[in-house]
């Protein structure tokens, strides 16, 4: 397989993460980086031994890349996708994918017009542990799924006095878990209720709570906060459940399961796993799961991709409904 040449827009922590992630395989390689902030791209390029850095997105596209990864500000995404599509450069966009649903729909229309592929990078979908859990749920390991719980937090408001992605905590914090929920359950939302709160700063919503009902009357709760650091996800079934938080994974199922990362041996007994103890198995499967490489293989038609733009729009309709439900104070019904 040819190693595809990748350009990265956004020289912050996510841009550095892309460079580190693609080191696990040979499907693609970062060759150039862009950032509008003077000196930022050059510092990342020098520190990562990349051959090219620029403050011009147009020059990044002209460098001879096979696809571009967008990790920078949400307000730049539409213009960047338009420029890339006009030059037939596929885009892989890190979640949250867009500032709002309308922008995402415009991005989709542009890529469709130019017959350019667009995918969304959802970090949890690159996790071999979560991939195994998806297979276990599909195999009826925990019985019928009955509820989902999500808690996400970033204390940037306390640390910096400002917030990313405007005042919408659902776009900034809940988006990735909404993608994960639909990926694990294969169900779409039918209704959404939500509210936000301002307990710290008068100009920003620093938290939110949403209840989403998926098809089959499956309830999901999403709690977000800009005042703490948190990342926990749980999915419960009639005969078991899974909780993931930090380094720990708690599992209870109705039958044994032999997986590619870990085994579950005793039905009905809670098993507690540490990612630290699973590190060798995770590393062994990281190359196949890594999403930038998977996107490269998708472009070459040798692999599938878990979150193409069509699925991203379906998921973002849920996030958009959270925002509208909180703003309008009513339940939003979805098709």
Image (tube, rainbow, N blue to C red):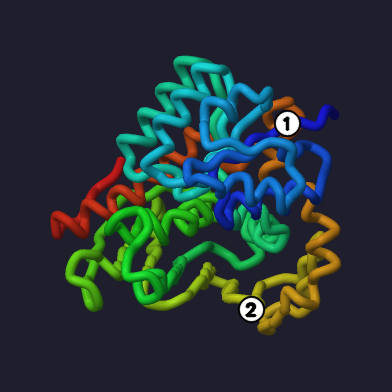
Mark 2 secondary-structure assignment = strand
Residue 268, quarter of picture: bottom right
Instruction: Give the camera-side residue of 97 and 255.
Output: 97
Mark 1 → mark 2, Cα distance in angstroms: 39 Å
Q: Secondary structure at mark 1?
A: strand
The C terminus lies in quadrant: top left
Which residue: 30% across, 70% down? 207
Q: Which residue is mark 1?
A: 5
Residue 121 visible in the shown view = yes
Q: Compare marks 1 and 2 and give the one earlier in the sequence.
A: 1
Q: Is disc 1 surrounded by few (<14), some (14 to 19) or many (20+) residues within 10 Å?
A: some
Q: Which residue is mark 2?
A: 250
Query: What residue is shown at x 38% (from left), y 66% (from top)?
Result: 222
Residue 225 appears in the rendering = no
Q: Is residue 84 left or right of residue 105?
A: right
Q: Quadrant of residue 280?
A: bottom right
- 254, above or below 98, in the image: below
Front one among 236 and 193: 193
């Amino acid at each position: 397989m040819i190693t595809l040449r990748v350009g990265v827009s956004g020289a912050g922590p996510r841009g550095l993460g892309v460079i580190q992630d693609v080191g696990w395989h040979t499907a693609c390689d970062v060759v150039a980086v862009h950032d509008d902030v003077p000196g930022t791209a050059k510092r990342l390029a020098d520190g990562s031994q990349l051959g090219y850095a620029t403050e011009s997105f147009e020059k990044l596209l002209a460098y001879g890349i096979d696809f571009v990864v967008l990790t920078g500000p949400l307000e730049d995404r539409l213009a960047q996708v338009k420029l890339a599509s006009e030059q037939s450069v596929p885009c892989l966009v890190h979640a949250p994918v867009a500032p709002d649903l309308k922008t995402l729909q415009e991005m989709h229309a542009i890529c469709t017009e130019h017959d350019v592929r667009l995918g969304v990078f959802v970090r949890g979908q690159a996790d071999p542990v979560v991939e195994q859990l998806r297979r276990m749920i599909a195999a009826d390991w925990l019985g019928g799924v009955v509820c989902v719980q999500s808690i996400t937090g970033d204390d940037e408001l306390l640390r910096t006095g400002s917030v990313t992605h405007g005042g919408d905590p659902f776009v900034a914090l809940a988006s990735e878990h909404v993608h994960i929920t639909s990926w694990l359950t294969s169900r779409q939302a039918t209704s959404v209720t939500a509210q936000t709160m301002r307990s710290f700063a008068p100009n920003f919503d620093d938290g939110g709570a949403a209840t989403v009902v998926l098809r089959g009357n499956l309830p999901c709760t999403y709690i977000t906060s800009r005042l703490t650091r948190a990342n926990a996800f749980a999915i419960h079934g009639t005969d078991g459940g899974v909780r993931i938080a930090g380094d720990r994974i708690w599992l209870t199922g109705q039958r044994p399961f032999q997986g590619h990362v870990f085994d579950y041996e005793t039905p009905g007994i809670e098993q507690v796993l540490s990612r630290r103890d699973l590190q060798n198995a995770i590393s062994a499967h990281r190359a196949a799961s890594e999403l930038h490489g998977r996107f490269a293989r998708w472009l070459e038609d040798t692999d599938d991709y878990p979150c193409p733009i069509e699925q991203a729009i379906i998921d973002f309709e849920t996030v958009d409904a959270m925002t509208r439900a909180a703003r309008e104070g009513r339940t939003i019904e979805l098709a």
